[in-house]
Amino acid sequence: MPQAFRSMRSSMRWTAGLLIAMSAAFLGPTRAVAQATGSRTAGGSMANGLEYSYQSRSSIGYGRDTREWLSFVVLWRMPPRAMAGARTGRPDTAALAAAERRYRDLRRAAEDSGRSFLGGSTGVVIQNAYVTRSDRQTLWVEGEAFTVPERDSALVVLVDLTGAPAQPARVVGRAYVPAELPEAFWSKHWTSGDTTFLVQSRNAHGILREALRTDPIIRAFVDSAVAAAPPRRD
């Protein structure tokens, strides 16, 4: 992957713990209940001019009964041209090198403070977001802190990067949506030996976009970002 494009959005982090609940002696004998919990972060391009990062959480009980739900989403409205020097076709290597250093510094600072970095970079445009590693999570986006809902709803943070890198990123809104998503969105995964296999729906970004657009604040943000973006050149 070239230095001009680097993204942590496709990275996925799984953590697992085991919670065992046993009845107190005065309640009489009963079977112990075990549940494994985990989280995953991922992201990508939702549409031309609009990128996203998200975290989901899951629980697996007896009988392999799995439930997965959305914790938070960060929507990044990108500049029309995210690459330095895109107008002339000659990338500004100095600007790219500076962005690369800043990206590494932000990532290292998050890791050193015990947080998981989930931003990324496209050319000279940096997406700066990280989340605490705890059950009661705090999401930091461009320096602003947000409390992550535990289960029933998902936090959505809207970020405007259209002025980057000359102008700072702006958090322009937040909203909450139901944490449940259509079954088709969730990836299918299984383990064989030491290898975990993961299959993601090809239309996952479209399913997520339509689910988020049920909120009027998010719908206005998404639609304006898509309308302002130049057409793709595939």
Image: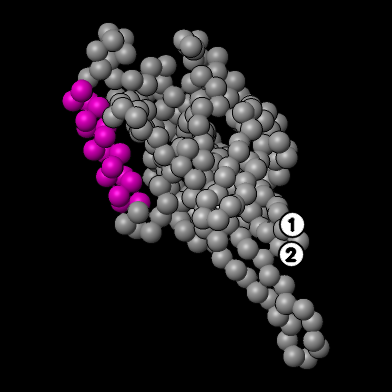
Q: Nearer the viewer, residue 221 or 130?
A: 130
Residue 24 is left or right of residue 233, and the answer is: right
Q: Examine the rendering and report whether any part of residue 85 can be seen.
A: yes
Rendered location of residue 189, percent (x, y) = 62, 46
Vertical relation: 143 (above or below) 229: below
Q: Which residue is depicted at the point 74% across and 82% down?
A: 23
- Residue 4 is covered by the magenta coloring: no
Q: Quadrant of residue 207?
A: top right
Q: Which residues are magenta?
A: 93-110
Q: Nearer the viewer, residue 164 or 173?
A: 164
Rendered location of residue 108, percent (x, y) = 30, 49
Q: Quadrant of residue 34?
A: bottom right
Q: Which residue is depicted at the point 68% across and 46% down?
A: 179
**Amino acid on which disc 1 is placed:** Asp
SS at mark 2? Answer: helix
Q: Nearer the viewer, residue 197 or 65?
A: 197
Query: What residue is shown with label 1?
Result: 65
Please tell me how many numbered marks the rendered image carries. Answer: 2
Image quadrant in which the N terminus is located: top left
Q: Residue furthest bottom?
A: 26
Q: Nearer the viewer, residue 77 or 85?
A: 85
- The reply to whether discs 1 and 2 touch (Cβ–Cβ < 8 Å) is yes
Q: Residue furthest front?
A: 193
Q: Which residue is depicted at the point 64% across and 54% down?
A: 58
Q: Quadrant of residue 136?
A: bottom right
Residue 2 is left or right of residue 34, and the answer is: left
Query: What residue is shown with label 2?
Result: 62
